Amino acid sequence: MIAVGLDRIARAHERISGRVRYTPLVFSPGLSAVCGVPVHLKLECHQPTGSFKLRGATNAVLSLSDEAKKRGLVTASTGNHGRALAHAAKAEGVRAVICMSALVPANKVDAVRALGAEVRIVGRSQDDAQAEVDRLVREEGLTAIPPFDHAEVIAGQGTIGLEIADARSDTELVLVPLSGGGLAAGVAEAIKGRLPQARVIGVSMERGAAMYESLRAGKPLPVEELETLADSLGGGIGLENRYTFAMCRDLLEDVVLLSEEEIAEGVRHAFAAEGEMVEGAGAVGIAALLAKKVELRGPTVVLVSGRNIDEALHRRIVDIDGLKAMSAGGPVP
């Protein structure tokens, strides 16, 4: 396994301090009652760009040489990494080009543009967007900052694990959204290094879970990218994957998959019971608990990874009018 290492994660935590938010770890009375163990939520949805991705992108940019920054930055993204890289690049006064497929929701594309980055919409998959990244690196000399399979990106995401371990040393289980594996690999590396008794389980969707299928096959596989409420978890892991496949294989105890309705229930619970507007990918840990997809043995932490959901879609999922009627004791329309 090519591991990032606890020392590199600790250096990343020092490097990004003051540039990202130390997010709260909040006790959930509702989930704790349902689960029979203490459940806390690590609210990465409170980051300035709305997701955990700001950690990895910021650490990666700050780790670059001045010459690499001057060439400009480029990445492929399902939305949140692109927004994070655009934010980090703007803070450093650096050009950023974000390549995304047509499957990326419009609200996420608009948020990237609002930060001053150049947007390229290419094809209908993360692989299509990555092909444009490769072309820009090859023909224009831009510096690529991958969304997950990059040592400094993984280290930045791993700082979440350090914060969890510092806040709750009795943690027995951490539930982490799983896509390309940068978040899961970094968090698992940090948790295993600080809390060897703790388990880390990845959570993904049934529709197009590339890391899950690759782990089952024992090697990185191409997986068709499908529309899903957990759109931030879409995309492949790269057939030449260097870090995240091996780290997820060796550090995760399990991976569980969720149906679209189960993901929607997680979004609804986050809003109604926790007071948090959360996107589908950010709600998968909550959803896994509600669907009883994991064995619980002790204090559990759920990583709520992002809030960047289209508002109209969120209204349809949670049925705001219905929730208001319920809270007032009236009939649900």
Image (cartoon, rainbow, N blue to C red):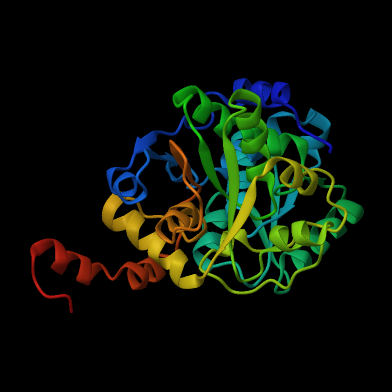
Q: Position of residue 302 (x, y in %)?
A: 46, 44
Q: Position of residue 16 (x, y in %)?
A: 59, 27
In the image, residue 209 sits, relative to residue 174, either above or below, namely below
Left or right: 248 in relation to 187 = right
- The image quadrant where one finds the C terminus is bottom left
Residue 252: in sight, yes or no?
Answer: yes
Q: Position of residue 258 (x, y in %)?
A: 53, 65
Q: Residue at x 70, y 40 (%)?
A: 251
Q: Residue at x 34, y 48 (%)?
A: 31
Q: Residue at x 63, y 34 (%)?
A: 158
Q: Nearer the viewer, residue 244 or 198?
A: 198
Residue furthest left as drawn: 329
Q: Nearer the viewer, residue 304 or 309?
A: 304
Left or right: 140 in relation to 56 = right
Q: Position of residue 23 (x, y in %)?
A: 44, 34
- The image quadrant where one finds the N terminus is top right
In the image, residue 211 sits, relative to residue 47, either above or below, namely below
Q: Residue at x 52, y 32 (%)?
A: 20
In the image, residue 99 sits, relative to residue 59, either above or below, namely below
Residue furthest bottom as drawn: 333
